[in-house]
Image (cartoon, grey):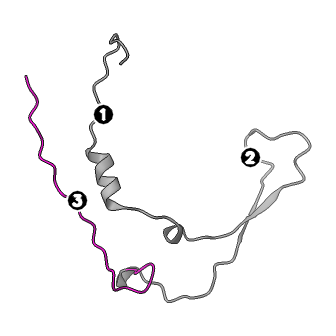
């Protein structure tokens, strides 16, 4: 049975060219706290189940991680996401000759 030809739909993203802010957050998600988040300290617990730990490296029992917002550094294009979702992978036959 022949496949039906699909029509291409135009995918558009909302762009706010007049906006001066790089990240315009919706009102309900806006935070008015302007202080920077403090780095968090994670401690190593030697009583946990065995894990892959190299010998002689136990002196590094804690480390600090800077709290960076991902939404500022991450660029997401809605067209690319929808294009990936709509893309159909070809049906691969196990015994087909490579092309």
Q: Which residue is mark 3?
A: 11
Choose between 97 and 85: the one closer to the eye. Answer: 97
Q: Which numbered tag is attached to residue 48?
A: 2
Q: Is residue 1 left or right of residue 85?
A: left
**Sequence order check: which comes first, mark 1 or mark 2?**
2
Tell us which disc is closer to us: 1 or 2. Answer: 1
Considering only vertical position in the picture, is 75 above or below 36?
A: above
Choose between 45 and 27: the one closer to the eye. Answer: 27
Tell me the distance, in whole angstroms, between the alpha carbons under discs 3 and 1.
20 Å
Q: Is residue 10 left or right of residue 78?
A: left
Tell me the distance, in whole angstroms, between the alpha carbons under discs 3 and 2.
50 Å
Residue, x 33% and y 86% (percent of image)? 18
Tell me the distance, in whole angstroms, between the alpha carbons under discs 1 and 2.
44 Å
Does the magenta run of residues contain 90?
no
What predominant SS class does the magenta segment belong to?
loop
Asked whether disc 3 touches disc 1, contact meaning CB atoms under 8 Å apart, the reply is no
At numbered mark 3, what does the secondary structure look like: helix, strand or loop? loop
**Sequence order check: which comes first, mark 3 or mark 1?**
3
Magenta region: 1-25
Q: Which residue is mark 1?
A: 89
Does the magenta run of residues contain 10?
yes
State the image quarter where residue 10 is shown: bottom left
Considering only vertical position in the picture, is 18 above or below 48?
A: below
Residue, x 35% and y 12% (percent of image)? 97
């Amino acid at each position: 049975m022949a496949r039906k030809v699909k029509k291409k739909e135009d995918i558009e993203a909302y762009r706010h060219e007049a906006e001066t802010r790089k990240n315009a957050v919706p009102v309900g998600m806006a935070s008015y706290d302007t202080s920077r988040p403090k780095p968090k300290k994670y401690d190593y617990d030697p009583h946990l189940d065995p894990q892959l730990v190299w010998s002689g490296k136990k002196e590094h029992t804690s480390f600090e991680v800077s709290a960076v917002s991902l939404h500022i550094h991450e660029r997401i294009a809605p067209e690319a996401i929808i294009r990936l979702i709509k893309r159909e992978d070809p049906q691969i036959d196990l015994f087909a000759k490579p092309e």
